[in-house]
Image (cartoon, rainbow, N blue to C red):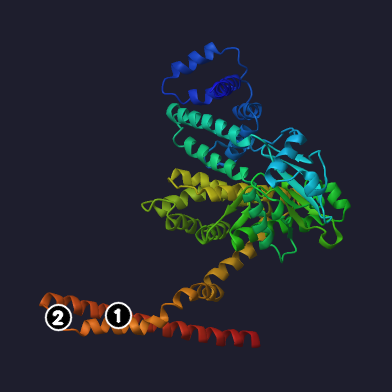
Amino acid sequence: MILKFLRLSKIIRIAVKYGIDQIAISGLAVPRIARFIDIVLFWRDLSAPRGERLRRALEELGPIFVKFGQVLSTRRDLMPPDIADELASLQDRVPPFDPDLAIAQITKSLGAHPDQLFASFERIPVASASIAQVHFATLKDGREVAVKVLRPGMKEAIDDDVALMQIAAGWLETLWADGKRLKAKEVVAEFDKYLHDELDLMREAANGSQLRRNFADSDLLLVPEMYWDYCSSSVIVMERMQGIPISQLDKLRDAGVNLEKLSRDGVTIFFTQVFRDGFFHADMHPGNILVSTRPETLGRYIALDFGIVGTLNDFDKDYLSQNFLAFFRRDYKRVAEAHIESGWAPKETRVDELEAAVRACCEPIFDRPLKDISFGQVLLRLFQTSRRFNVEVQPQLVLLQKTLLNIEGLGRQLDPDLDLWKTAKPYLERWMSEQVGWRGLLEKLKDEAPRYSHIFPQLPRLAHQVLSRAAEPPASDELMVALLNEQRRTNRLLRTIVYFTIGLFSGLVVAQVLLRFYFRH
């Protein structure tokens, strides 16, 4: 209890020092309180912009608050642009913890000392972040591996700090005029889930394994193999990857890597993850990406750190593809209709009003060359416009928008002339064609076939049972009417099934003939 009180006292002291209270005070209905506090705390230097002061306060509060700031920077649908931009520059600058603690953690989690598990183990970590640090090692069979070890005591520290954040969020929603719109409690709850997900390294290992399987036949992306015999919730062991950090452009050029192709490949990888798999690496900043320099895989991306992934269902993918295509065709009416059809905009929203708002927001983007148009900014502007119409922005789309901004920045760092739309448009159009064309129909029929295979053989028996019951003499006129209605309904149902079956098989036969004709000529 004393430790929690001391921690809360430190948070309040740092918040006051950097004027974080000033943001809340400015929203109070009674301006006298704000003036009084400014007089009492006259010694503070608040000349720096509010975003910079907030960033410095979070850095001083420690790694968990730095993580919180990073999450806040992704919520551009809620945060003012100046604060979001400043928080986006937050980095985990955390010194490594004692190697003896890492060895103790490995011994406890895997049931043996590193000297027994590995042929060699490097005590000095090669990377350190707020949640975990990484050591290199070699397995007994000679395979080189990376060992990721959870920072000791993280769960207790996170629980304590998040509890204090929840208290602060309650105050914020009560005191600040705009606090409820910012959904402070929801943001803290989202952050709590995000952090606890990262604490389970088995979840990260499973994410990496899924991504590796998705790109098993690809020549664009390499993902390290997870060695499950050495994995637990606090320690994971994976294949050691050899490559150059993607931010070191001079070294990449010297190694013979084609940077223009690398930038295009990054866009292709992203859209493949989103629209083909609905499963994407959501933390693709330069620190988590290497480029392979091995002769057999030269120039391929290497993905690391799978603690944060995003998932999209078919509904999300359809929404995104329709919006992207409509945006770049300047079909703002279709954008407005897609929002209302999806249910994210209230049904009573007028299409023409939402269309006009989207046009006013996004038309200026198109007064520049296509290569300068930012997909991420388009999505951001869409979120900002949606807020005026009470559209609930889905968390998975916010994560996607943050990842898209990372990919764009990375791609244009590699190739300033990257035309993102030229690279992405064919992929989006092909995906849409596969969803609504013959291929999409056949795939859906293939998916549904196992379900209907159990129903079709039972249809004659079910029809006979219904007709037999309908043929029995009624006990009263009321029963007679009910049975006649049931018989009519059954007959309509059977006719519908017969017509649908005939139409379906006729369509498939016609499609097969057309496809044979197409491939023959």
Which secondary structure, mark 2? loop
Left or right side of 325 for 493: left
Residue at the (48%, 59%) spot, across then down: 334
Q: Which residue is mark 2?
A: 474
- The spot of residue 7 in percent (x, y) is 58, 23
Of labels 1 and 2, the one closer to you: 2
Residue at the (37%, 84%) spot, across then down: 498
Residue at the (44%, 16%) spot, across then down: 32
| Structural crowding at the residue carrying mark 2, measured as other residues with C-alpha within 10 Å and reported as few (<14), some (14–19) or many (≥20) | some
Asked whether 471 or 319 is in front, the reply is: 471
- The spot of residue 244 in percent (x, y) is 82, 49
Pointers 1 and 2 in contact (CB under 8 A)?
A: no
- The spot of residue 279 in percent (x, y) is 60, 57
Rendered position, 76 above or below 168: below
Q: Which residue is mark 1?
A: 492
Give the amino acid type for the residue marked by disc 2 in the picture.
Answer: Pro
| Structural crowding at the residue carrying mark 1, measured as other residues with C-alpha within 10 Å and reported as few (<14), some (14–19) or many (≥20) | few
Q: Quadrant of residue 511?
A: bottom right
